[in-house]
Amino acid sequence: MSDSTDFPSSRHRQPRQTHEAFERFRRQARELLAAATPPEAADGLWLGGSTHEHRQADLFATAPASDASSTPASLPARTAPRFQVPRRFIQLARLCVLHRDADRFARLYRLLWRLVHEPDLRQDFLDPDWQHLRQMARAVQRDAYKMRAFVRFRPVQVLANDIGPGAGTGAEAGAEAGNEPSAASTTGPLHVAWFEPEHDVLTLVAPWFARRFAGIRWAILTPRGSLRWDPHTEVLEHGPPARREDAPAADAGEALWLTYYRHTFNPARLNLSLMQRHMPGRYWANLPEAAEIHRLAAEAPERLHRMTSTPAFKRPESSTKPVKTKST
Amino acid sequence: MLQARKTWRASSASPLGIHAVILYIGTVDTQQKLAILADAAKYDASCAASGGTRRNSSRAAGGKGGIGSHEGSGICHSFTPDGRCISLLKILLTNFCLYDCLYCINRRSSDVRRARFSVEEVVSLTLDFYRRNCIDGLFLSSGVIQSPDYTMGQLVRVARTLREKHDFRGYIHLKTIPDASPELLTQAGRWADRLSVNIELPTQTGLAALAPEKNADSIRHSMGQLRQSIDEARAERRAVRAQPIRILPGARARRARPPSFAAGGQSTQMIVGADGASDAQILHTSARLYADYRLKRVYYSAFSPIPQAAAALPAQSPPLLREHRLYQADWLMRFYGFEAHEITPTDGGMLALQVDPKLAWALAHPEQFPVDLNRAPRELLLRVPGLGVRTVQRLLAARRARAIRADDLRTLRVPTRRVLPFVLLPDHRPAPEAARQLGLDAIRQADALRTPVQASLF
C-alpha cells in the first residue's frame, strides 16, 4: 500500500454505506456552523458514533423532545448554508468518521471551524490539527489494508438454503432442508471468515471483496457487523454483529496452506522483528499460519546448520550427462 | 452495480445458521509435492504482484462467475519468519532439471528430493489458496525438463487454463525459459501479468563459470524479445485509446480491447556473492538492464547456503547487509536521480557496509551541502540523507504556504539528527564539521554492531 501524496488516494472509492456516516456528520456540522456554534460548545454533542440506528438519535440530542420519533432521515431538510472547504478536508473526514476514537467528530468539527474562520489554514498542512486528522485517516486506511490482506476464508458446505432475503432462522431452515435439495448446494460452498478490525472499516472494504470474489459465496463476520455476498444476484448484505464461535474452525484443506507457509521460509534469513513490524501480534489469533511461527523460528538455526555442514555432493562423472526425466 | 443493501435477521443460532460439512482438497501426495516444490522455489526473490491491467470479477467488469481482481499493486497476505511477504503462490512446476548450475539447489547433480506437479494440480492449488484470500496470484517457475520449449509450454498451459477455463483474474507471473521459442513467449505474455528471465549473474564470465549450460546471449535475446512485445502491445493500446469510438445504432459504446502482453512488464534477478563481481559491476549491469530492456525491477539475491553446495562455490556467503546496500543503491538510481557511477566508489568497487549509499555520497561531496530546504529544487532535496521521496513531496507542498522551520521537520517525522547537518533553515545552520562527525559516528556505530554478530550473518 502506498499513496504518493499526503492524503487518501481515491483508488478504493468509498461505498455508499460509509457515505452515510459522513453525511450524518456533514449535516450536523452544517447546522452547527450555521448557528455559529464554536467547537468548545459543540463538544458535548458528538457522541461516539456507531452505525447502529438507535445510537444515532443521540447525535441529535439537541432536537426538541417532542420530536422523539425523528430519525436522521426524517429531519426537516433545512437549507443550511454551504461552506467551502478544501477537498482534502472532505477526503480526510470520510475516513476519520470511521476511526474508533470517540473524539473524532469533535476534532473534525474543530478543524472545520478553523478552516472557515482562518483562510490561511487551508494550505498550512503542517498545522497540528491537520496532522492529527491525517494520522487518523491513515490509521483507518492501514486497517482497511490489513483487512484486505488478513481476512481468511474457510469453505463450508451449507446444507440449508438460508441465503437470500427473508430466509428463515436456523430452525426453520433446518425444516426446509428436508423438503428441497437446496439450490445453494449446487452453487458451491460458502466461504466464511472471522475478523476483528480495529476501526469501522468493514463497509469500506466490502466492495473490494465483492469485486475480487464475485463468483463465489462468501461471508465476513466481525464483532461489529457481518457481510454476505450472493454471486447470482450480486447483492452485498449487511448483517448483525457476530461472535468468533459463529465462524467455522480450520478445515482439513488449510493444511496445504500451512505446508506452503512452512516451506517457503528460508531459515538462513531469520528476521522476526521485521516480520512482526508488518504482521503485528494482534492479528495472529485469526491467522492460521501464526501458530507455526515460533516453531519455525526455533528450528531455524538447526536447519541452517544442517544445510551448511552437509558436505558437497558430487555424482560420479559418468552420470552427469543430462538425463531424460520421467513424470512422477 | 451493487443493489440496495438488505439486512438479514439474526436467529438465536449463529447469523448464518450453518450446518457445516468440511471440504477437503488435495491428497497426501499433493502435500508432499507442495513441500518439495515450495522449498525448491524459495530462492527466487522476484515475487511482487505489481503492475498489470486493473480488472476484477464482477459482472460489470465482464466477469463470468470466476474470481480474482488486480487493482495496481499487490497485497502482502502473510509474512514468514524471515520478514519476507507472501503475495503470490511461489512454486516450481517441477524441480527436475537438465542443467547443472552450481549455485542452484535443483541442479542436475544435486541429491535433493524431486517432484513434479501436473498442470491441474497447480491450477487447483492456485484457486484454492486464492479463495482463502491467502494469495494475490501465482508465481510459477520450473526446472528445465525435456527441452526449453516443452517446459515453457507447460507453464503457458497453467496460465491459459487459469485464465480461460476458470476466468481467473488474479495476478500471474511466469518465469521465462531462455531458448524457448518466440511463439511460446508470445502466448505467455497473453496470459501473464509479468514475465521474467533471470540474468543469474552480473557478468558473462561469472555465468560461464557457474552455469556453463546457460547462454548469456540467449538470455539477453529473450529479454529483448519481451521488451519488444511489451512495447508493441502498449503502443497498440495507446493507438486504440486515441481512436474515436464508433457506435452502432442501439448499441452501447464500448472500446475494443487489444490483446495485452505482460502488462506488468518484465523483471529479472541476479545472484550476489556467488562469483567475484564487485558492487560496481553489479550496479552497472543493472543500469544497463533498466535502460536496454525497460525492466520494472532488478532483484538481488544474496547467495544463500544451499544443501550439498558444490565445492566450486565460495566458502563464505556474502553478508546480508550487502544485498541490502545493493537494493538501496538500486532505489537511488530509480527514484532519486542518481547515476550508477555516482554511487559506486572508485576504489575496490564495493559499497560501504557501514553507511547507506546516500549518506556515503553526501559525505564524499561536502561541496553540495548544506542544502537550503526552502529554496532548493526537488532534485537537490532528494540528495539529502534522511529525506525520502514522500517527505520531499510534503516539504514542497508545505513550503508553498510558508517557510519551513526546524520544528516542522519534527512534525513531518524527519530523522532530524541525520538531516540537520546537511540542511539550512531560517532557524538552523549546521556546524562546519557536523556532517563529517555524523559520518564518523555512523561508521563507529556500525562497526560496534557488526563484530559480535559477524559469525552468524550470512
Image (spheres, rainbow, N blue to C red):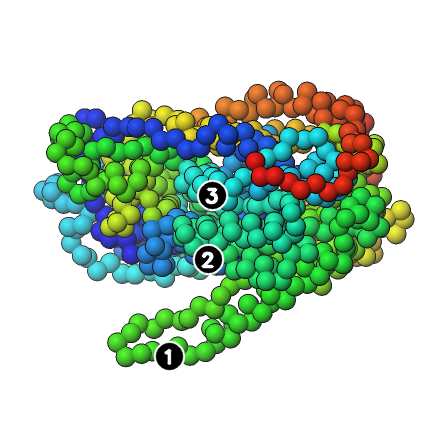
- x, y (%) of residue A157? 29, 33
Q: Residues within 10 Å of mark 3 (few under 14, many from 20)?
A: few
- x, y (%) of residue A216? 33, 44
For the point 29% across and 48% down, the residue is: A231
Q: Chain of mark 3?
A: B
Left or right for B316, reference A272: right
Label 2 secondary element = loop
- Say which amino acid is labelled 3: Glu
Q: Can residue A306 be seen in the rendering of this structure? A: yes
Q: Which residue is mark 2?
A: B54
Q: Chain of mark 1?
A: B
Q: Can residue B264 be seen in the rendering of this structure? A: no
Work out whether residue B251 or residue B183 is closer to the camera in this orientation and state it.
B183
Give residue A306's mark: none
Label 1 secondary element = loop
Comparing labels 2 and 1, the label whose residue is closer to the camera? 1
- Say which amino acid is labelled 1: Arg
Left or right for B72, reference A31: right
Left or right for B411, reference B165: right
